[in-house]
Image (cartoon, rainbow, N blue to C red):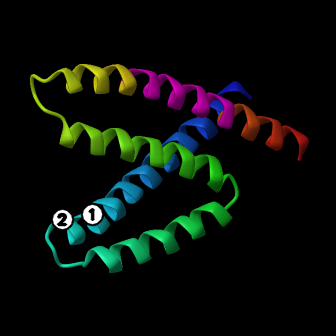
Amino acid sequence: REEAEEAEEAALLKQEEELCKELGRKLQARLQGRASGAVSPEAFAQESRAWAKSLVEAPGGLDMLSMMSSVWRVKGKSYERRLWGLESVFLETRDFFSRIGTGISLVRGAMRASRMTQDV
């Protein structure tokens, strides 16, 4: 019985890994078009709004979107930092607390999902 549970958990982890890789490839493709200038700022904004709407409407999508937007903000800030300026110190501190908040949000989301699956 334990072996079957372990095998099922391993299969789920493998599936999650593949889904994350696919999401990463799609995200890279979306950002590459804008970064290269092939997609206008207006078109990118419109596509992003449509994508965000579809994510919000998916089960658990609001939590996922919240976490994703936090990660995007952190990454965006890392590109605008000055290397040795005081601003960089404040941004690093804020990012540290943002990462803690993201971790807490992930745990809450996992606990919520766990409760939902146990209720079913």
Tell me how many marks there are.
2
Comparing 41 with 64, the one in front is 41
- Residue at screen point 72% across, 31% down: 111
The type of residue carrying mark 1 is Leu
Secondary structure mostly seen in magenta is helix
Q: Which residue is at the far right? A: 119
Check whether the beta carbons of the residues at disc 1 and disc 2 lie within 8 A of each other. Answer: yes
Mark number, residue 31? 1
Q: Circle 1 — which element?
A: helix
- Residue at screen point 24% across, 19% down: 89
Comparing 7 with 86, the one in front is 86
Identify the magenta region. 96-109
Q: Position of residue 64 (x, y in %)?
A: 57, 49
**Residue neighbourhood size for the residue with mark 1, other residues' Cα within 10 Å, grouped as few (<14), some (14–19), many (≥20):** few
Looking at the image, residue 61 sits to the left or right of residue 22; the answer is right
Q: Does the magenta stretch include residue 44?
A: no
**Residue neighbourhood size for the residue with mark 2, other residues' Cα within 10 Å, grouped as few (<14), some (14–19), many (≥20):** few
- What residue is pinned by disc 2? 35
Check the image and report above or below for 91 versus 7.
Answer: above
- Residue at screen point 68% across, 31% down: 108
The type of residue carrying mark 2 is Ala
Q: Position of residue 119 (x, y in %)?
A: 90, 41
Point out the image quarter for the N terminus. top right
Check the image and report above or below for 6 versus 68.
Answer: above
Q: Is residue 106 magenta?
A: yes
Q: How far apart are marks 1 and 2 (CA)?
A: 6 Å
Looking at the image, residue 64 sits to the left or right of residue 48; the answer is right
- Residue at screen point 49% across, 70% down: 49
Q: Circle 2 — which element?
A: helix
Q: Quadrant of residue 105?
A: top right
